[in-house]
Image (cartoon, grey):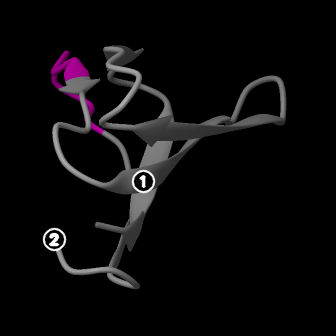
Amino acid sequence: MYPGIIRAWHHHLRGQINYFMVVRGVAKIFIYNEESGELNEIVSASGNLQVICVPSHYWHGFKALGV
C-alpha cells in the first residue's frame, strides 16, 4: 500500500482470523472490540517485525504511514 492509504472498518463473521505483519515501511493498525468498546492502535514497522492477530469478530483496519 502507498502511504496515506486507509483500509478500514470491517470484521469477519465466518471465523476468519487475520494476521498482519509490516515487511516494508510503517503502518498503524486499529482493532476494535464492539462488545467491550475497547479500541487498540498499534504502530508497526519493518525495523521491528511483529505479527498482529485479529480475531474474526473484532472490527479492524489499517493505514500505511510511510515507506
State which quadrant residue 10 falls in: bottom left
In magenta, the rendered stretch is 12-18
- Mark 1 and mark 2 in contact? Answer it, CB < 8 Å: yes
Q: Nearer the viewer, residue 50 or 47?
A: 47
Q: Is residue 40 left or right of residue 36?
A: left
- Circle 2 is placed at which residue position? 1
Q: Residue at x 33, y 80 (%)?
A: 3
Three-letter code, disc 2: Met
Q: Is residue 45 left or right of residue 5?
A: right
Principal secondary structure, stretch drawn in magenta: loop
Secondary structure found at label 2: loop
- In this rendering, the answer to whether 34 lies above or below 60 is above
Residue 59 in view: yes
Residue 43, image x and y in percent? 57, 42
The tally of labels here is 2
Split into 4 quadrants, where in the image is the N terminus? bottom left
Residue 9 in view: no
Residue 23, image x and y in percent? 16, 37
- In this rendering, the answer to whether 14 lies above or below 41 is above
Is residue 14 on the magenta stretch? yes
Three-letter code, disc 1: Ala
Crowd rating for badge 1 (residues with CA inside 10 Å; few <14, some 14–19, many 20+): many
State which quadrant residue 14 falls in: top left
Q: Is residue 37 left or right of residue 15?
A: right
- From mark 1 to mark 2, how far is it between C-alphas? 10 Å
Secondary structure found at label 1: strand
- In this rendering, the answer to whether 36 lies above or below 43 is above
Q: Is residue 32 left or right of residue 16?
A: right
- In this rendering, the answer to whether 17 lies above or below 64 is above
- Circle 1 is placed at which residue position? 27
